[in-house]
Image (spheres, rainbow, N blue to C red):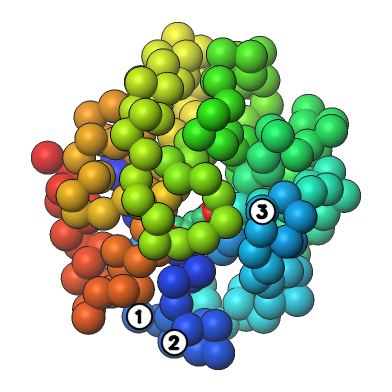
Amino acid sequence: MAVQISPSILSADFARLAEAAAAVPNADWLHVDVMDNHFVPNLTLGLPVVESLLKATSTPLDCHLMIEDPDRWAPAYAEAGAGSVTIHVEAAKAPVRTLRQIRAAGARAGLALNPATAVEPYEDLLGEVDMLLMMTVEPGFGGQRFLDIVLPKIRRARGLIDGHGGQIWLQVDGGVSAETIERCAEAGADVFVAGSAVYGAADPARAIDELRSAAEK
Ligand code: DX5
Ligand code: ZN
């Protein structure tokens, strides 16, 4: 599958989100980090901001829910019009039902795993997901250092996905930069979230082009 880049607006100016979206016309997605200060020790934004952002950009939104009760909230993001909604296995109490509700509302259903969470126990859920998200930092903050220890798991996830035969995307999120993206691509990832590497750059659109060509190498 072609490489996809999903810049994370967590590293953008929250008072200028429409401008942040407009600054990356070459992005495949806009990654929106929803944090509730319970599942992770940080608080960002919720459904009202996502609804406003949907009106402000035509780039599809890739909503990453780092919240304690995704079963309650995830379907509403899909119903609002998010292109993709990802829930964490560590937080979901009824992931099968929630993933099905996300799909039924017309969005792609994503399942995220923290760095210390093994992928093998979720093999039977592959038929319920359109994307697996491998966190390559502990979730909660942008600008953290990429965790190389996750690379073997990304390889194993790629093997499970290929064995399953479905069209499941493999996303990496956390510390992805021009320096680390090749390792992720080599391990089998095909969708790359980057926050500080895009919005910390003088020219965010150019940073995306550079990430894309590094991943395609
Ligand atoms: C972290 C978020 C990431 C974050 C990545 O919990 O899920 O999406 O924005 O930021 P960088 O790319 O700076 O590590
Ligand atoms: Zn994220």
> Badges 2 and 1: C-beta atoms under 8 Å apart?
yes
| Residue at 24 percent of width and 45 percent of height | 180
Q: Bin the neighbour count of mark 2 within 10 Å (Cα to Cα): few under 14, some 14-19, many 20 and up.
A: some
Q: Which residue is mark 1?
A: 23
Q: Assign the C terminus to one quadrant of the image.
A: top left
Q: Is mark 1 within 8 Å of ligand 1?
A: no
Give the residue number, with chain letter if any, for mark 2.
Answer: 19
Tag 2: amino acid: Glu
Residue pictured at 66% horizontal, 53% vertical: 40
Q: Residue 96 placed where, x, y %?
A: 78, 28
Q: Residue at image x 37%, y 29%? A: 149
Label 3, secondary structure: give it. loop
In the image, residue 144 above or below residue 158: below
Q: Mark 2 or mark 3, which has the lower sequence index? A: 2
CB within 8 Å, label 2 to label 3: no
Q: Residue furthest right?
A: 72
Estimate the x, y position of residue 49 in percent, counting from the top left: 68, 77
Question: Quadrant of the rendered structure where residue 3 is?
Answer: top left
Labels 2, 3: front one: 3
Estimate how packed mark 1 is, as few (under 14), some (14 to 19) or many (20 or more) residues with alpha carbons within 10 Å.
some
- Where does the image place residue 194, in percent across and percent down from the top left? 37, 58
Instruction: Name the residue type under label 1.
Output: Ala
Q: CA distance from mark 2 to mark 1?
A: 6 Å
Q: Which residue is mark 3?
A: 40
Q: Residue pushed farthest left?
A: 217
Badge 2 marks a residue whose secondary structure is helix
At x 42%, y 50%, the residue is 174
Secondary structure state at the residue bearing disc 1: loop
Mark nearest the camera among 3 and 1 is 3
